[in-house]
Amino acid sequence: MNIKQSKEIWAFLALSLILLFNLIFTQGFFSIEIRDGRFYGSLIDILNRAAPIILTATGMTLVIATGGIDLSVGSLMAISGAIAAVMISNGDFPTIFLFVVPIILTALLGVWNGLLIGFRGIQPFIATLILMVSGRGIAQLLTGGQILIFEHQGFELLGRSYFLGFPVAVSVALLMALAINLFVRKTAIGLFIESIGGNSTASRYVGINDKMIKVSAYVVTAICAAIAGLIMTGNIRGADSSHIGLGMELDAILSVAIGGTVLEGGRFHIGGTILGALVIQSLTTTILTLGVPVEITQIMKALVVVLVSFLQSENVKEIFSQYFNPRKKALLTPIEKQIDDSTKEVLNV
Amino acid sequence: MCATPLLIMKNISKSFPGVKALEGVDFTLQSGEIHCLMGENGAGKSTLIKLLTGVYRISEGEMLLSGKPIHPRSPLDAQNMSISTVYQEVNLLPNQSVAENICIGRVPRKFGLLDRKSMIRKAKEILEWMNIDIDVTQPVSNYSLAIQQMVSIARALDIKSKILILDEPTSSLDTEEVEQLFKLMRKLKDEGMGIIFITHFLDQVYEISEKITVLRNGKLVGEYTTENLPRLKLISKMIGKEFTSEHVKKEFRNTDSNPVLINMEKGSVANKIEEYDIKIRKGEVYGLAGLLGSGRTELARSLFGLDRLTTGELWINDEPHKGIRPIEAIRNGMGFCPEDRKEEAIIPDLSISENLVLALQSRKGVFNKIKESEIKEIVNHYIDALSIKATGPEQKISTLSGGNQQKVILARWLAVNPSLLILDEPTRGIDIGAKSEVMQMIKVLSKKEISILFISSELEEVTAVSDRIAILKDRRIIGEQKGNSVTERNILNKIAEVPTL
């Protein structure tokens, strides 16, 4: 693949930078021990904690590619965790039900998001804000406003167990991301999503059912968030409705952006998103191991957002390309450029 | 009468980087006059208006308002010079009341606070004077488009304007609403206002205006008194052709005996296209001729299901299709190559290859993805067949020239193997070489039993390829011609005909 055109390159560079920083400044960052047949170390820790971000960000990638956004993922995580916890505390369900039922119910909430946006034409930001706010309330209602603690060996497998020395959660997240990528690329859904995000009018002219595609993007995102919620709930053996997935929507959106998917929609890169999620988690972990107060992580993340959006912006690209290629015509302000383009169009030049 | 004209625009030129949009244009407006500004797309009408309203600055020339030179720097500046504009799209705040919309930007104040009472009184006064009786405290969106248009005018008038510019104010109004607007325009004219009126409806030009200024390709064609300029002359001045000699007609194909492919009975879409019947036969090129705004595109859109029919029944191959949608149209063998390539056709971020197979993929459905090898074959075939100039199938479509983009879009529809291809202005914005290639392609396709619905503002193009044409005017079909009688002169005569009522 052409390195220059690769969208993943920024995420890869950022990740390398963070790792390089740790190589120099953080002692023992790269050391991995084996204890009780499990791998231990900062890197494993990063992977493990990145699993929920990878999951939600993968779904978010599709939603953003359609030109939308899903703010409700954090609350959906809380809901699915709460459902599982309530089921464990109130009955003797087969283990598989503890996974399937929360996922299906959360997927229905994804349908709700999709219907509001695809069929009612409500702005994605507003439509998903509804569930972002009310969803956490629903989760708290389910758990009775308390942290619902449980023990269930089968259910905890997802969040706590290890397979071949690696956390199961990581494998699940990566497999899910891979499966989604395969699914959208082996069917025409990926092409249609990029087409809708790139030019929705033109997509309608070729008969693409933009409504259904949008609904499915929000459903997939909800399913991803549900699994992420189950992982975290299993991990702490409890449904903490007011904290699980709090702020996850921002981490997910940020991962998508770092991964090279433009927030306006169109082309998407799930591979880049996974790298983006790793960037965020390693950034967080690095700051924590440095002993810097947690509050600083938010500021660091904000700086990364600014930097990424800056590098991705068309205007910056334009300025750079003109800087490096002075033979190009003199710099036009955006409005002049618009006028220039439109007159040329009109005059058939 | 030799009073100073209200407005003189003298020797106006406007250049954009690399393009001359206007060159040495003169325009004079007297007070108490309704003056039509006419011209096809790209003639320079809107540039001229935008110079007058301060959106752009003139490159050369001067403007005199009541004999004094003016240099409007912004629309607000122009407004303060008593030049007001009402645009085609209603620019009101839909959720605010009528009174607020009328007084926006100059609300009456009392002790520094909004004086609601005097605002309402002021709004009422203006509307009363305009003979409009509505509740000014209601939100604007509660009223019809026509009333909204009037409110826009009321807003413009409030500043004691001397010049009122109406830029296609009638395009979304029905007959009665237009009449209402005209009444108002006459009243304003009698008050001594100078009105610049831009419209695509010929009948309206002749009903309301005294003077006509025609522009073409950024140059002045001339200023005429409406009653001394027959319709046919006006049209030929707009499109730049004097009909002294007929072009030699291509061979005449009789398609009467071909089976009917598309049959629309009494089709109409509210506010877009009036009731029409159309029969398109297998393998024929059916042209839609008419001036800008005559309803050509709207007719095509209604056949393809982009706009829902208000009335009418569509039959494809003798099978009825109720409430057709684009995907159904595509599955039934239709293809639609839209007019606005940038907004309606290309997906700029995607590659040539992805853009090209999009319609075929959509027809096959989401789960039936075309194999990579097959895509490669199709794409290479069309790049070759239509000689699309690109570095390769993976090149972004937005980096191609207009002509090559158009070819990709044509290929998009050819790939679905259509029985009816709708081509809306397929030659717009592409260079002459690509133009003739497209025209050549139409001829080849029609020999392959593919029907084509061809739309173009270039009458020459329409008559060169069409076996049959419908002539449109003011959103309705006013005539049909076939074979040898498909000539530019016949079309123009028909369009220029004064409607008999």
Image (cartoon, rainbow, N blue to C red):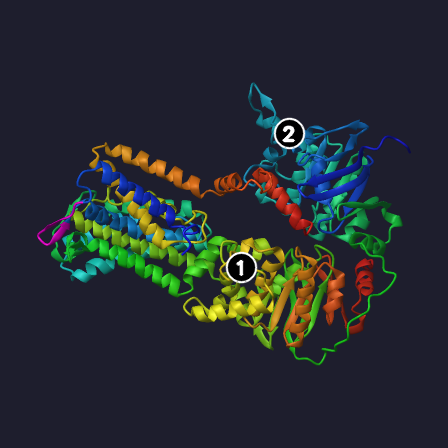
User: Number of numbered discs present?
Assistant: 2
How packed mark 1 is, by other alpha carbons closer than 10 Å (few <14, some 14-19, many 20 or more), is few
Q: Position of residue A139 (x, y in %)?
A: 25, 47
Instruction: Name the residue type under label 1.
Output: Thr
The single residue placed furthest to the bottom in the displayed view is B257
Q: Can you say whether B67 is above or below B217 in the image?
A: above
In the image, is residue A32 part of the stretch drawn in magenta? Answer: yes
- Residue span colored magenta: A31-39
Residue A237 in view in this figure: yes
Q: Position of residue B470 (x, y in %)?
A: 73, 66
Residue B310 in view in this figure: no
Q: Residue at x 66, y 35 (%)?
A: B155
Give residue B139's quadrant in the image. Answer: top right
Left or right: residue A160 compared with residue B390? left
Left or right: residue A189 compared with residue A20? right
| Chain name for mark 2 | B
Left or right: residue B399 compared with residue B280? left
**B224 or B364: nearer the viewer:** B364
Q: For residue B391, which numbered disc appears in the image? A: 1
In the image, is residue A195 part of the stretch drawn in magenta? Answer: no
| Chain name for mark 1 | B
Q: Residue at x 55, y 20 (%)?
A: B112
Pointer 2 residue:
B121
Q: Residue at x 18, y 38 (%)?
A: A27
Instruction: Name the residue type under label 2.
Output: Arg
Q: CA distance from mark 2 to mark 1?
A: 67 Å
**A266 or B481: nearer the viewer:** A266
- SS label for mark 1: loop
Q: Report the quarter where the N terminus of chain A lies.
A: bottom left
How packed mark 2 is, by other alpha carbons closer than 10 Å (few <14, some 14-19, many 20 or more), is few
